[in-house]
């Protein structure tokens, strides 16, 4: 998140310094916002405790009545939708704990000390638990993180993007084969369920969750040469069976990681701001697709 928050990026781009916007815009504001985020994970109001964000963190909330409540949160979010929150009040009394149900989540489970809670989000999108808490009481929130293949209702025709929980995924040139190029990638989707065939894997280097996506490399059947002298360009051969189709799996990575393995990241725009560098493409989010025939 930090890398994406500090630099304005296009969805088909590379990580570069933009001299005309970056000094006063995204980097300076992004740094301040990121520095303030830990202050907003936990909050207190007159009714009790509010949990706004999810991260592995410890904190201490002082309620209006003076009671101190140490909190300990453990989670693999944003790659995992499971959150464990330990509540250890210093005194007795009923405390309201509100947990924000994130906007992307449609299915969730909530437990306190292993007992399922029948709770639905209130009008502000929070799950409300009101009880007398004892030391080391534990809240378990599990938010289902499905893979969604999405389209843009007003743009990017013929393309889809991959979303899981809060994360948008991108194809990155660094993860392709040596002779692979981004424009060769065409996702191959199951017409009965577009998310079929996608597999999640953990990257050994970063610990982040990547996605292996079914894809195809389609080559048109080669017909007659375009010129009498021959050469590389030919008419496409008519007929559905005339082209070769190579099935493969393409690794998609979280958008905030995209471009991080590019040797030229953040250098372009400082040393060289020419048009060739502005147009250089290392990663892209919106990808063309085709429906599988199997």
Image (cartoon, rainbow, N blue to C red):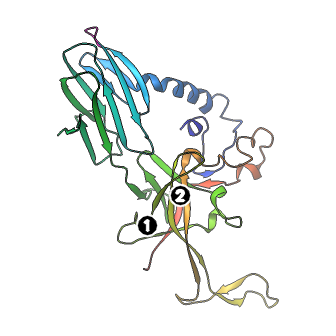
Q: Looking at the image, is mark 1 or mark 2 nearer the viewer?
A: 1
Outermost residue to the top: 66
The quarter in which the C terminus is drawn is: bottom left
Question: Does residue 95 appear left or right of residue 231 in this picture?
Answer: left
3, 209: nearer the viewer: 209
* 274 drawn magenta: no
Residue pictured at 18% horizontal, 15% vertical:
93
* Residue interval drawn in magenta: 63-67
Q: Work out whether 117 lies above or below 230.
A: above
108, 24: nearer the viewer: 108
Q: Work out whether 49 lies above or below 80.
A: above
Label 1 environment density (alpha carbons within 10 Å; few <14, some 14–19, many ≥20)? some
84, 122: nearer the viewer: 84
* Quarter of the figure with residue 21: top right
Q: Earlier in the sequence, mark 1 or mark 2?
A: 1
Dominant secondary structure, magenta: loop
Dot 2 corresponds to which residue?
Answer: 286
Q: Work out whether 159 lies above or below 37.
A: below
Residue 53 visible somewhere in the drawing = no
Residue pictured at 70% horizontal, 44% vertical:
265
Residue 225 visible somewhere in the drawing = yes
Q: Work out whether 242 lies above or below 159.
A: below
Residue 117 in the image, given as x and y percentages of width and height: 19, 38
Give the mark count. Answer: 2
Q: Secondary structure at mark 2?
A: loop
Circles 1 and 2: CB atoms closer than 8 Å? no
Residue pictured at 69% horizontal, 39% vertical:
18
Dot 1 corresponds to which residue?
Answer: 197
Residue 4 in the image, given as x and y percentages of width and height: 57, 40
Residue pictured at 33% horizontal, 49% vertical:
144
Residue 237 in the image, given as x and y percentages of width and height: 61, 89
């Amino acid at each position: 998140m930090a890398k994406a928050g500090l630099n304005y990026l296009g969805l088909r781009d590379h990580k570069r310094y933009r001299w005309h916007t970056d000094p006063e815009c995204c980097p300076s504001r992004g740094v301040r916002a990121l520095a303030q985020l830990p202050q907003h994970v936990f909050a207190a109001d007159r009714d009790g405790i509010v949990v706004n964000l999810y991260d592995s963190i410890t904190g201490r909330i002082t309620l209006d009545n003076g009671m101190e409540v140490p909190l300990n949160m453990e989670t693999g979010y944003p790659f995992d939708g499971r959150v464990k929150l330990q509540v250890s009040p210093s005194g007795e009394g009923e405390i309201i704990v509100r947990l924000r149900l994130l906007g992307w989540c449609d299915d969730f489970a909530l437990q306190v000390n292993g007992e399922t809670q029948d709770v639905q989000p209130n009008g502000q999108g929070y799950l409300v638990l009101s009880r007398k808490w004892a030391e080391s009481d534990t809240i378990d929130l599990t938010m289902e993180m499905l893979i969604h293949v999405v389209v843009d209702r007003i743009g990017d025709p013929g393309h889809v993007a991959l979303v899981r929980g809060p994360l948008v995924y991108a194809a990155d040139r660094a993860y392709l084969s040596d002779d692979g190029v981004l424009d060769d990638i065409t996702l191959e989707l199951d017409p009965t369920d577009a998310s079929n065939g996608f597999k999640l894997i953990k990257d050994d280097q970063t610990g982040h969750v990547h996605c292996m996506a079914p894809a195809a490399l389609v080559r048109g059947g080669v017909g007659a040469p375009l010129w009498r002298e021959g050469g590389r360009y030919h008419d496409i051969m008519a007929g559905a069976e005339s082209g070769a189709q190579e099935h493969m799996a393409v690794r998609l990575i979280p958008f905030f990681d995209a471009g991080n393995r590019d040797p030229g990241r953040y250098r372009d725009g400082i040393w060289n701001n020419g048009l060739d560098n502005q147009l250089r493409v290392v990663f892209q989010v919106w990808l063309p697709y085709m429906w599988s025939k199997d």
